[in-house]
Amino acid sequence: MPQPSLKIDGARYVITVDDQRRIIRDGSVLIENGRISRVGRADELAAARADRVIDARHFVVTPGFVNGHMHISYAHPVRGIFPDDLGSPLKQVFALQTAMTEDEEYHTTLLALLELVRNGTVCLLDPGSTKFPDACLQAYEDAGVRVILGECVTDREAPFTLPRYPTAEAVARTAAFIDKWNGRLEGRLRAWAMPFSPETCSAELLQALKRVADERRTGLTLHHGSGPQARREHGGRGEKSPTEHLEKLGVLGPNVLLAHALGVDEAEIACIARTGAAVTMCPVTAAKGARGATALGRMPELLARGVRVALGCDSPNNSNHLDPVRTMNMAAIQYKDARQDIRLVPAETALEMGTRLGAAALGLGDEIGAVETGKQADLVLFDTRRPEWQALWNPVNNLIYNTDGRSVHTVIVDGRVIVDDYRQTFVDESRLFATVQEIGERLQARTGITFPRSRWPIL
Ligand SMILES: [Zn+2]
């Protein structure tokens, strides 16, 4: 059955992020069969008819947002339990994840999806934290988003609980996962290879998984960091740096996405650029987790070398919010302050990372990331009838510096409206909130991972 057509009519601004970066005042977008068929001024599209017309005179239209690193499945029920003086909660985080049941993960995933789509996210990559994809498939289908999934594998000891297998089994599991899941949900679901990190995987495993991804024409993502200490350790083994070591193994390439990439130096940036690998940076996680983004982050240099840089929210116990607008804001302001140079990471660049550049990093640059004829119709409509949008002269500046996801009024994926007038229809929100709160109580009781509720007395 053909999909109903949709017209976004007379938007206050359409920020296309197309090749010319056009911003169309009083702009319209026509969507047919899930794709954008026309974009232009409202008068140019005046004769275009559609099954549904959205009067967009109060709206700013942008491409839908892409989240390139999003551990979706486990943190919501325990979000915020870790006090700041605990230090890194990674050990507890992974223990809680390991303890999660299928039903718990399904509900947690639903809540994460709810938060993501209501803030304008249309596409996310979960770096292998979903343990029960069969159970969660329904949540992804109901929410209507695009998602990249994989099975997290390692074959070495890790400082925290991770799925660990003999090397051959890790390879077989990855191949089977991709073969089973890639292309589901009418193509909205992609499956990738997802080794956890170079530290927790042998060279043999990393090389084999790269081959699996290449043979299946899909992607590979892994956690990757560097820094002076890591370079010293690698130097002690006769290697140049963590990044150049990956290159030497043949594990870098255009279908590889390095998560975080904090601490890389000039030679490593050159190596990433040379191999065509992409990067997801999580600016809020890095700042909140005291990981040294301001001292070690090299986002401006990666961008200057033409590296495809996506943004990620990481997890509800890292960022902790799942708001692409706040994430783009952090990306835009973090380096300005760190280096006392206001010209770094302009608002437009932050928006590119959240849309077309992020889509390109995830291998979806031909499909999404811009409001452009022929692209899949993934759009966000921001409601400017709110104080944070006033006064409206430069919509990109307003979006990145003034606003957040609360003014997301409508979200469209593949031409289907998945958030309509601030509401979604795939889940009963108040019931879900109560369920996830109960899951949090059960998880803490079961694992014994509990903390004083607050540093201040709760009466
Ligand atoms: Zn991660």
Image (cartoon, rainbow, N blue to C red):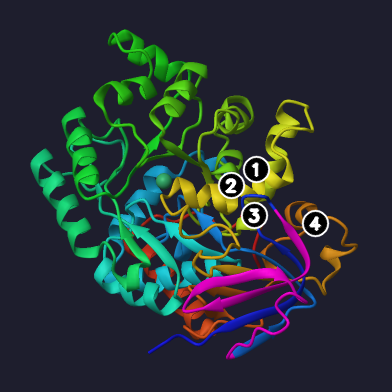
CB under 8 Å between callouts 1 and 4? Answer: no
Q: Which residue is mark 1?
A: 331
Q: Position of residue 43 (x, y in %)?
A: 78, 77
For badge 3, the amino acid type reads: Val
Residue at the disc numbered 4: 398
Marks 1 and 2, how far apart at CA: 9 Å
The relative height of residue 259 versus residue 143 in the rendered view (above or below) is: above
Find disc 2 in the rendering and name its residue. Answer: 353
Image coords of residue 123 (percent x, y): 47, 61
Question: What residue do we see at 65% from left, 83% from top?
Answer: 48
Question: Which of the two discs, 1 and 4, sits closer to the camera?
Answer: 4
Residue closest to the far right: 391
Local SS, label 3? loop
Does residue 356 appear anywhere in the picture?
A: yes
- Mark in front: 4 vs 3: 3
Residue ID at (41%, 16%): 231
* Position of 75 relative to 172 (above/below): below
Q: CA distance from mark 4 to mark 3?
A: 15 Å
Which residue carries the number 3 mark?
A: 17
Q: Nearer the viewer, mark 1 or mark 2?
A: 2
- Between disc 1 and disc 3, the foreground one is 3
Query: Exactly how many numbered labels are in the figure?
Result: 4
**Is ligand 1 less than 8 Å from the beta carbon at label 2?**
no
Instruction: Please name the residue shown 78% across and 27% down the image.
Output: 340
Q: Identify residue type, mark 4.
A: Asn
Q: Which residues are magenta?
A: 22-51
Closer to the N terminus: mark 4 or mark 2? 2
- Disc with the residue nearer the chain's start (1 vs 2): 1
